[in-house]
């Protein structure tokens, strides 16, 4: 049989396009901030993860320049061979101190942390218990394990306890994995109960705090938010959101660091961060420690934005964080609303099926410390206009 080995590439893409499921990313023509330039036009950014606007903070830029001059453009190797520089170790010490943990290890990305560490923590004969709405990087990490996998209904502590009773009968080790802040809905995991249940069954806890760092707990994340710092087995996170740079991290015990350093292949087999990236990571932590006003302004903007959307009659779901969905239900309504906002100079993307359920499409808004009251007012006015036109609000 004669086959075309690459025909599926175009066929798959064409199918995505026919269903409106393909990504069509816009191109930023300058820095990412509360305002961005796209196609020569300045718009208000409402879909960036750069919560605290740190990617443009002068201290981070200066630190990156200084490291570039001192260390050069690259690290030259993977971390375990010859790619560990003193600045990488400085970052890890700073992360541990900032998160209130014994130690930490920095990964190339947050995805690399989940995909590389989760499969090493549980093996055949073990059990992995995961929230049904966990991030795709967790799902991929889970798929790489040989452990028995159990999924509990989103944030349902009763079902989690029921699942734990079942797996406890046969598992050697148990790992409970959850997002801290759920990236589509903006709600927060019930970490106090998750930790309590884990302790009852002698299980390890693993929380992906990507959207919590810089945001919850005065910026120190979900551990501090719930006064559980140092009591969660793994606090995984990322520098690519509120920290404004790039990179993943795993904070916990010294034993966790040494285990991950020796067993996690995404860490072992990927080049280490260029020194200027590490310097910006380090400076981002220092900024959060010395300039709490960034976190306060983020929450001031978030609370105002949520309050005004609710007063207009919009459904913002279960969000309690700066991730603020405006629920439309139907995917076509989310696309139309996003197009309307774009006409008014607001960059806010629709999230539609298959990323969310068919009847749960939304615009996912991300407030930014750099948004002015005028930015928020313009965005809210556009929401009110298009919400009424699309009959989403009265």
Image: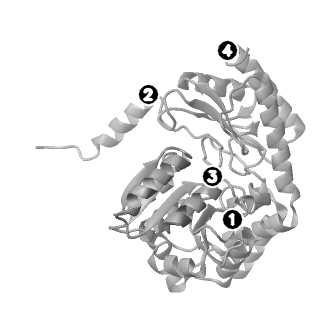
Say which of marks 4 and 3 sits in front: 3
- CA gap, disc 2 to disc 3? 36 Å
Which circle's residue, 3 or 1, is located before the other in the chain? Answer: 3
Q: Which residue is mark 1?
A: 228
Say which of marks 2 and 1 sits in front: 1
Q: Which residue is mark 3?
A: 190
Using the image as rendered, state which of residue 175 and residue 373 is in the foreground: 175
x, y (%) of residue 93?
Answer: 69, 79
Q: Is residue 205 something one can see in this rendering?
A: no
- CA gap, disc 4 to disc 2? 24 Å
Q: Which residue is mark 4?
A: 391
Q: Quadrant of the C terminus?
A: top right
Q: Secondary structure at mark 4?
A: loop
Numbered label attached to residue 104? none
Q: How is the image coloured?
A: one colour
Q: Is residue 198 something one can see in this rendering?
A: yes
- CA gap, disc 1 to disc 4? 44 Å
The residue under the point 33% across, 36% down is 11
Q: Is residue 134 above or below residue 90?
A: above
Using the image as rendered, state which of residue 326 and residue 231 is in the foreground: 231
x, y (%) of residue 84?
Answer: 59, 82
Which circle's residue, 4 or 2, is located before the other in the chain? Answer: 2
The residue under the point 73% across, 68% down is 280
Q: Secondary structure at mark 3?
A: loop
Q: Secondary structure at mark 2?
A: loop
- CA gap, disc 4 to disc 3? 35 Å
Picture quarter containing residue 251? Answer: bottom right
Q: Is residue 237 left or right of residue 150?
A: right
Circles 1 and 4 in contact, beta carbons < 8 Å: no
- CA gap, disc 2 to disc 1? 44 Å
């Amino acid at each position: 049989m004669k086959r075309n080995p690459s025909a599926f590439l175009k066929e798959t893409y064409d199918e995505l396009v026919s269903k409106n499921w393909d990504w069509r990313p816009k191109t930023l023509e300058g820095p990412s901030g509360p305002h961005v330039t796209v196609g020569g036009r300045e718009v208000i950014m409402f879909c960036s993860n750069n919560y605290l606007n740190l990617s443009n903070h002068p201290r981070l830029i200066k630190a990156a320049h200084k490291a570039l001059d001192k260390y050069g453009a690259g690290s030259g190797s993977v971390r375990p061979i010859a790619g560990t520089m003193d600045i990488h170790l400085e970052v890890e010490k700073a992360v541990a101190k900032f998160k209130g943990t014994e130690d930490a290890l920095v990964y190339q990305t947050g995805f690399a942390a989940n995909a590389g560490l989760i499969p090493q923590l549980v093996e055949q004969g073990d059990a992995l218990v995961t929230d049904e709405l966990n991030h795709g990087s967790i799902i991929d990490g889970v798929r790489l394990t040989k452990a028995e996998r159990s999924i509990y209904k989103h944030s349902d502590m009763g079902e989690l306890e029921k699942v734990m009773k079942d797996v406890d009968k046969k598992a050697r080790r148990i790992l409970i994995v959850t997002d801290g802040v759920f990236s589509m809905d903006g709600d927060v995991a019930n970490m106090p109960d998750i930790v309590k249940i884990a302790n009852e069954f002698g299980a390890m806890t693993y929380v992906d705090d990507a959207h919590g760092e810089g945001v919850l707990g005065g910026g120190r994340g979900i551990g501090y938010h719930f006064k559980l710092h140092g009591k969660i087995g793994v606090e995984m996170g990322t520098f690519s959101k509120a920290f404004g740079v790039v990179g993943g991290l795993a904070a916990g015990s010294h034993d966790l660091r040494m285990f991950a350093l020796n067993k996690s292949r995404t860490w072992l087999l990927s080049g280490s961060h260029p020194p200027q990236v590490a310097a910006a990571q380090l400076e981002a932590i220092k900024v959060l420690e010395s300039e709490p006003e960034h976190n306060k302004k983020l929450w001031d903007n978030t609370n105002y934005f949520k309050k005004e959307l609710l007063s207009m009659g919009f459904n913002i779901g279960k969000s309690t964080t700066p991730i603020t969905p405006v629920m439309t239900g139907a995917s076509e309504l989310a696309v139309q609303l996003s197009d309307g906002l774009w006409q008014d100079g607001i960059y806010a993307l629709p999230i539609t099926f298959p990323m969310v359920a068919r009847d749960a499409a939304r615009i996912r808004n991300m407030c930014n410390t750099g948004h002015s009251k005028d930015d928020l007012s313009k965005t809210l006015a556009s929401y009110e206009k298009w919400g009424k036109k699309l009959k989403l609000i009265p």
